[in-house]
Image (tube, rainbow, N blue to C red):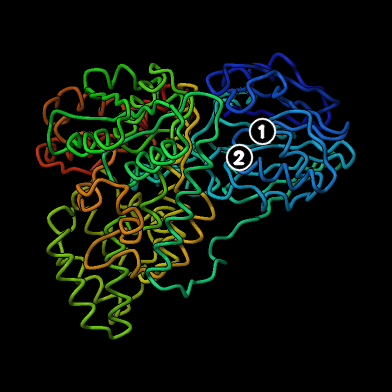
Amino acid sequence: MCGICGMVVKDSSINPTIFEKMVNIIEHRGPDDVGYYYESGLALGHRRLSIIDLSTEGHQPFHYMDRYTVVYNGEIYNYIELKQELIENGYSFFTKTDTEVLIAAYDFWKEDCVNHFNGMWAFCIYDKEKSRLFCSRDRFGVKPFYYMIHNESFVFGSEIKQLLLALDGKPKANHDSLISYLVLGAVDYTSETMFEGVNQLMGGHNLTYNLINHEYKIDKWYDLSKVKRSKDSYDESVKRFREKFEQAVKLRLRADVPLGSCLSGGLDSSAIVTMADKMLKEKNEEVEQHVVSSCFEDKRYDEQEYIDEVVAKTDVTCHKIFPDINTLFNDLDKIIWHMDEPFASTSIYAQWNVFKTAKTAGLTVMLDGQGADEQLAGYTPFYQLLFVKLLKQFRFVKFFNEVKAFQTLRAAHEVRSTRSILKTAVAEAFLPRGLSQRLRKKFGAMSTNSPFSQEMLTHSRVTDAVQEYDKTNERKYIQSSMRQGMSSLLHYEDRNSMAHSIESRVPFLDYQLVESVYAMPLEYKIQKGITKAVLRDALTGILPDKIRTRYSKLGFVTPEDEWIRNNVDLFRSELQSACKALAGILQEEKVLQWFDANYMNFKRGDFTVWRIICAGRWIKLFNVEM
């Protein structure tokens, strides 16, 4: 894992001092090596975290065939197989790096090379012969790529803070993105960031920049919606899932450095840890597995009983951490600086501490369970999707059986009531109304007890973001979840891990596994009220039964509601300070009145207070002009 940077200047020379500051401000992403490449009007830079082939042969910018120069952040997990295929087509290799495989693949397949890669990446290839840059981001946006056009210069990097160094003055806030964050917690769901003029290349897209006419174009190269539905039976799908998941974990165990896993005690992270343990034992490899877990004394948020089940089954070395409100605000500015933008909840702080502990334990690579919920019906709205589907198909017996099972197994664990879900499902199935009408009604009701103005609640960016989630079409809902909700989680995953010079790998986002799951019908994912059915059945005998049959869900949560109630003066003071920083958007009096009236009744999962506080800190930390 690494960090990249690049700059193209149209009519003037590049200032090496500024450019090298842009490269080195992300030293945390690559503390092992640094490199620069300069050519007339072009500069490329790289910070290296050595994962595969720890020798100096992996130094970047990497030059190939006296024609190409590449800066690359990520891992091509199937590089060994691709290397053999390229050798059979006449290529020779002089290093053991995946970087050389990447650039050889580009020479052989040109832009189509990305369709051959199984991995995560953000890279830029300079083709000297064609005088152009070819930039690409992996299918689901696991690795970041930011860019901007400023004073006729094209600048890109792994983190936004790099680009800000190229600005003449203070950065400006993107009010549209900031409002959607404050109201919904939406981050990274469009190409725009919260900084005006700074954009991200979305996952599954390429960017080509012509160095002669200084024009660029962006093309979408990957589209999950084109994956066709599978006709496999349930048993065949279970077998296929097992094969794809096992392969995904196997590929992500490739590393020349110590490797561990994040373990929440939930189904997804436990699946990864137990599968990795199985593989290592079958290979008779004496590799000590380490896991890091976030725990709490408050049993409502603690999962130690499940974590301990995995530890007992696998004999992994477990490191438990206990995030504390007393250190949260001390670390907050540091976390926001690494995030580049305000983040949605204090659960990110728990994740920060997990990676911090992993670093202390000497780990350089960590596996994590991101991406499973969005595909395998891990969220409550998937029930609504299933109910709507069954009603529309007039499968009433199946519908009533699933409703009864849902009420029995899941209702006690859900924030939304069963009645509300059923009422909405029936309305969506038989009483179609304009979505915009429902949104207006929803946000109108919200405004009676909200710190936000009616204008903010009905802002076009906010309503568009909500409307994106079509809860009547399972495939569209999954696409939205993969593009919106998951993108913010990947943002946090990348920054929290790289802040501690750790590479995070997410097996559930192996594209072959994703496509296999996406092709399955929803009924394979929810059966008798049980979500992730195909995963549970596929890992019978691998997962401890206590976890395989677990139906509650937490993740890296924090007791934010209790923290607020027990520290009212602290949170109110932070909230007041944030309102002053956000004076162009928020009304301090309205926000404080709302807080005073509601702080005793905040529920788990309501992160509104936090979003306002975090945004205020971000404004001051990055000196953002409102």
In the displayed structure, does residue 622 sit left or right of residue 538? right
Q: Nearer the viewer, residue 285 or 35?
A: 285
Q: Nearer the viewer, residue 135 or 31?
A: 31
Quadrant for the N terminus, please. Answer: top right
Residue appearing at x 70%, y 30% in the figure: 96
The percent coordinates of residue 207 (x first, y second) are 70, 46
Residue appearing at x 34%, y 38% in the figure: 344
Q: Earlier in the sequence, mark 1 or mark 2?
A: 1
Looking at numbered disc 2 in the image, what kind of residue is underneath it?
Answer: Trp
In the picture, residue 102 is in which quadrant?
top right
- Which residue is the site of mark 1? 72
Q: Nearer the viewer, residue 52 or 619?
A: 52
SS at mark 2 in the image:
strand
In the picture, residue 580 is in which quadrant?
top left
Residue appearing at x 85%, y 44% in the figure: 90
The percent coordinates of residue 140 (x first, y second) are 53, 49
Q: Which numbered tag is attached to residue 121?
A: 2
Q: Is residue 427 above or below residue 294?
A: below
In the displayed structure, does residue 196 sit left or right of residue 590? right
| Whole-number angstrom distance, CA of label 1 to CA of label 2 | 7 Å
Within 10 Å of the Cα at label 2, are there few (<14), some (14-19), or many (20+) other Cα atoms?
many
Q: Is residue 553 above or below residue 435?
A: above
Q: Which numbered tag is attached to residue 522?
A: none
Q: Is residue 332 visible?
A: yes
Residue appearing at x 43%, y 27% in the figure: 287
**Which residue is situated farthest in the left direction here?**
600
Looking at numbered disc 1 in the image, what kind of residue is underneath it?
Answer: Tyr
